[in-house]
Image (cartoon, rainbow, N blue to C red):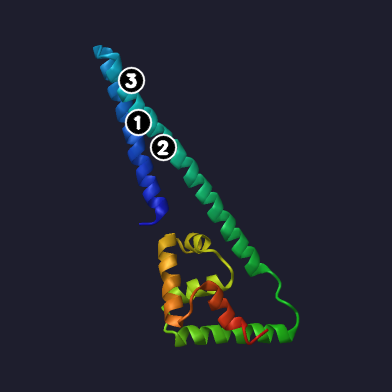
């Protein structure tokens, strides 16, 4: 389940705790229960409300971060390509070489997408947001890429493609 969905489920649960605790608090107050009992229920309600508001802010921050990442990605996609035919040919050849090597390494479609984003310089967290999966999933896919390529990590992956070009 994507993290945002689980956050929303937790928020709904916390809201239900706040509402039911508030209703119970009012009922207990009208029945004249001890102050200590009322205080206990108030603490539970306040804690649930606090976590609810903290989680709400976190979800809003995540949504803003996702929008920013998508905007950055879109701006990179819209960047003008260099006018030089040589650069365009070289870029196409590098892209073809990467695709061929990914195929030779027998990478899955998801691993190929992650591999390209790693080569473009995106962090694991950014890739997880862009792909809508957990960071743990991206970390596992990256590890699988490195294992299939017999490379120690991200920098070696980039160097593998750039070493002979520079």
The residue wearing badge 1 is 18
Q: Residue placed farthest to the right in the image?
A: 83
Does 3 sit left or right of 123 as displayed? left
Indicate which disc, 3 or 2, sits on the residue closer to the N terminus. Answer: 3
Contact (Cβ within 8 Å) of mark 2 with mark 1: yes
Pair 1/3: label in front: 3
Residue 22 point in image, percent of width and height: 33, 25
Examine the image and state in which quarter residue 47 appears. top left
Image quadrant for the N terminus? bottom left
Indicate which disc, 2 or 1, sits on the residue closer to the N terminus. Answer: 1
- Vertical order, 38 against 124 (above or below): above
Q: CA distance from mark 3 to mark 2?
A: 20 Å
The answer, for residue 26, to whether it is visible in the render is no
Residue 122 point in image, percent of width and height: 56, 66
Q: Residue at x 55, y 53 (%)?
A: 65
The residue wearing badge 2 is 52
Q: Residue at x 56, y 82 (%)?
A: 160
Image quadrant for the C terminus? bottom right
Residue 155 point in image, percent of width and height: 56, 74
Does 147 sit left or right of 61 as displayed? left
- Vertical order, 47 against 145 (above or below): above
Examine the image and state in which quarter residue 40 appears. top left
Indicate which disc, 1 or 3, sits on the residue closer to the N terminus. Answer: 1
- Vertical order, 66 against 151 (above or below): above
Q: Residue at x 42, y 81 (%)?
A: 148
Contact (Cβ within 8 Å) of mark 1 with mark 3: no
The residue wearing badge 3 is 39
Question: In what element is the residue under mark 1?
Answer: helix
Q: CA distance from mark 2 to mark 1?
A: 9 Å
């Amino acid at each position: 389940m994507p993290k945002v969905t689980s956050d929303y489920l937790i928020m709904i649960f916390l809201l239900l705790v706040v509402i039911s605790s508030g209703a119970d608090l009012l009922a207990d107050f009208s029945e004249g229960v001890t102050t200590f009992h009322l205080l206990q229920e108030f603490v539970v309600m306040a804690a649930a409300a606090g976590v609810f508001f903290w989680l709400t802010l976190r979800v809003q921050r995540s949504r803003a971060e996702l929008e920013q990442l998508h905007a950055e990605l879109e701006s990179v996609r819209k960047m003008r390509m260099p006018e030089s035919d040589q650069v365009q040919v070289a870029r196409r050849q590098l892209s073809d070489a990467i695709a061929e090597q990914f195929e030779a390494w027998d990478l899955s479609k998801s691993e190929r997408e992650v591999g390209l984003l790693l080569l473009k310089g995106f962090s694991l967290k950014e890739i997880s947001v862009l792909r809508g999966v957990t960071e743990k999933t991206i970390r596992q896919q990256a590890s699988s890429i490195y294992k299939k390529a017999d490379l120690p990590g991200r920098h070696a992956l980039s160097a593998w493609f750039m070493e002979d070009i520079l």
